[in-house]
Image (tube, helix red, strand yellow):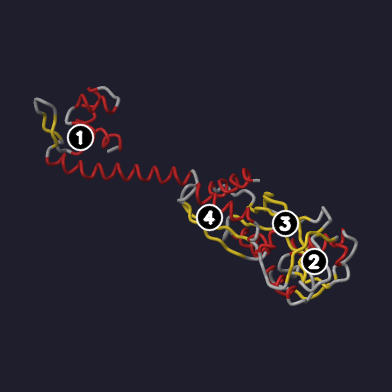
Amino acid sequence: MELRHLRYFVAVAEEGNITRAAERLGIGQPPLSQQIHALERELDVKLFHRTGHGVVPTDAGKALLVDAKRLLGDVEHATLNAQRAGRGETGHLHLGFTASAAFHPIVRALVREFRNAYPGVGLTLTEGTTAHLLAQLEEGRIDLAFLRPGVHSFAGVVLQDIASESMKAVLPVTHPLARRTRIPLSALAQEPFVLIPRAASPMLHDEIVSACRHAGFEPMPGQQAPQLSTVVSLVAAEFGVSIVPASVSQFHAEGVTYVDIADAKVRSKLALASLEGNSSTKVGNFLEIARQAH
């Protein structure tokens, strides 16, 4: 028994007339009658009583009609599910992000836009260091990661730039330069820097060190902090100064001020990382939304 036989049978049973069923199916009446007779021979039961006005199902036909509709409904449901999955409209997407990336408004905007475009896809968000996220990406535990690559590239990883932003100096409010709206980075050459350890965030760490070197000095190492919010808190406690991506200035902590840096080349890139060769449609859909937004 083939699915087309069930479709033919259901059409005849619902129409109660071979001619109308043939028109509905877009086939000729003789071939349809032949298919119904073939189905009856295969099942060794009579499916229809012939009347002067058409046909009516027998008891065997009524029983088959219930199961045939259910089977055809299951096939349609399976087809739609497969098509939706093929378009990346169902399933789950695992996104990773570094603490510094989470501050940027484009991250929130892309997540919001993806959820609106693909409401049938569940999202899981995971925060971690760059090294941790790259390892999870390689292991297949996350699908995409928002991170700050600096000048680095990574084997087997595709980086799609999604934003570039200026950096700001973060100073204690008691600092002599705290009331300035804009300072050259070289003005901090003699200050201890509160930095995230390179092992935790090599890209952001290298961006800050590179910016200082571009300004003509090596940053004086001070207290280390595991993440940007801690960096800001330690600056508030007067452990030193630091440089952060401009979007981090959304983090308001008592005792600190954010000051623009005059050096135009002091910028931080934000990228979306995916595993090379990843053919997931869901990943492709998210990357396409990011491309259109950039």
Which residue was labeled with disc 3? 149
Crowd band around label 4 with a 10 angstrom C-alpha radius: few (<14), some (14–19), many (20+): some
Q: Secondary structure at mark 2?
A: loop
Counting labels gives 4
Q: Nearer the viewer, mark 2 or mark 1?
A: 2
Along the polypeptide, which appears first: circle 3 or circle 4?
4
Q: For the residues marked 2 and 3, what is the alpha-carbon distance in whole angstroms? A: 32 Å
Q: Position of residue 288 (x, y in %)?
A: 59, 44
Residue 177 locus on image (x, y percent):
83, 67
Mark 2: give few (<14), some (14-19) or many (20+) Cα within 10 Å.
Answer: few
In-front residue for pair 79/291: 291
In the rendered view, would you say 64 is above or below 232?
Answer: above
Say which mark, if any, is on residue 14.
1
Residue for point 12% across, 38% down: 58
Look at the numbered disc 4 and give the secondary structure of its residue: strand
Q: Amino acid at mark 2?
A: Arg
Q: Left or right: where does residue 76 sit relative to residue 137? A: left
Q: Which mark's residue is nearer the viewer, 2 or 4?
A: 2
Do tag 2 and tag 4 residues touch (Cβ < 8 Å)? no
Residue underneath mark 2: 179
What amino acid type should be assigned to the residue bearing mark 1? Answer: Glu
Q: Position of residue 124 (x, y in %)?
A: 53, 60
Name the mark on residue 93: 4
- Residue flagged by tag 3: what amino acid is it? Pro
Residue 45 figure quarter: top left
Spatial CA span between label 4 and label 1: 43 Å
Label 1 element class: helix
Spatial CA span between label 2 and label 1: 82 Å
